[in-house]
Amino acid sequence: MYVLAEPSEYAFKKVGIQGKKFVTNLTNHAGFAIISTENGHETTIIEKECDFIYYVLEGSGYFEINGTREDFGKGNLIVIPMGSSFTYKGHAKFLLTTAPPFHPEQEVTL
């Protein structure tokens, strides 16, 4: 299947966010999830092995990436290079692409 429907079930709920993971064997180079939050991420993260690319489907708030605060809104693309520290606050729904695919053990939580 080349066209994937949004998953109906949440794959995870943690630290202020919840996510629905798209499962596909079409690529080993990226992972995809819908992330929803009411108030934002409750921790700061350093992702050791992935670039994180968030596309804002709805909502607004701000990201703090490597100490720099940047506001976001619907239609924005946020690119977080591997090794960066980041958190975000706000009410939003994102399409998250990770390259390569994300695995929880890659992440350092501050």
Image (cartoon, rainbow, N blue to C red):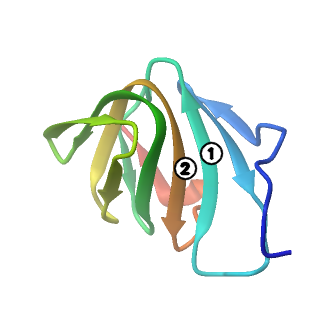
Q: Pointer 2: what residue?
A: 95
Towards the viewer: 30 or 107: 30
* Mark before the other along the chain sequence, 1 or 2: 1
Please report contact status of discs 1 and 2: CB closer than 8 Å, yes or no.
yes
Residue 36: x and y in percent read 58, 32
The residue lying furthest to the top in this view is 39
Q: Which residue is drawn at 42% across and 58% down?
A: 53
Q: Is residue 56 left or right of residue 69?
A: right
Residue 23: x and y in percent read 78, 63
Residue 88 found in image quarter = top left
Q: Is residue 103 above or below residue 90?
A: below
Q: Is residue 31 left or right of residue 20?
A: left
Residue 22 found in image quarter = bottom right
Q: Which amino acid type is marked by label 2?
A: Leu
Q: What element carries label 1?
A: strand
Q: Pointer 1: what residue?
A: 34
Q: Is residue 92 left or right of residue 102?
A: left
The total number of labels drawn is 2
Q: In which quarter of the image is the N terminus?
A: bottom right
Residue 87: x and y in percent read 34, 37
Q: Is residue 69 left or right of residue 91?
A: left
Q: Is residue 40 above or below residue 96?
A: above
Q: Quadrant of the C terminus?
A: top left
Task: State the mark number for residue 6.
Answer: none
Q: Residue at x 35, y 53 (%)?
A: 77
Spatial CA distance of label 1 from label 2 is 5 Å
Residue 20 found in image quarter = top right
Q: Which amino acid type is marked by label 1?
A: Ile
Q: Is mark 2 on a helix, strand or loop?
A: strand
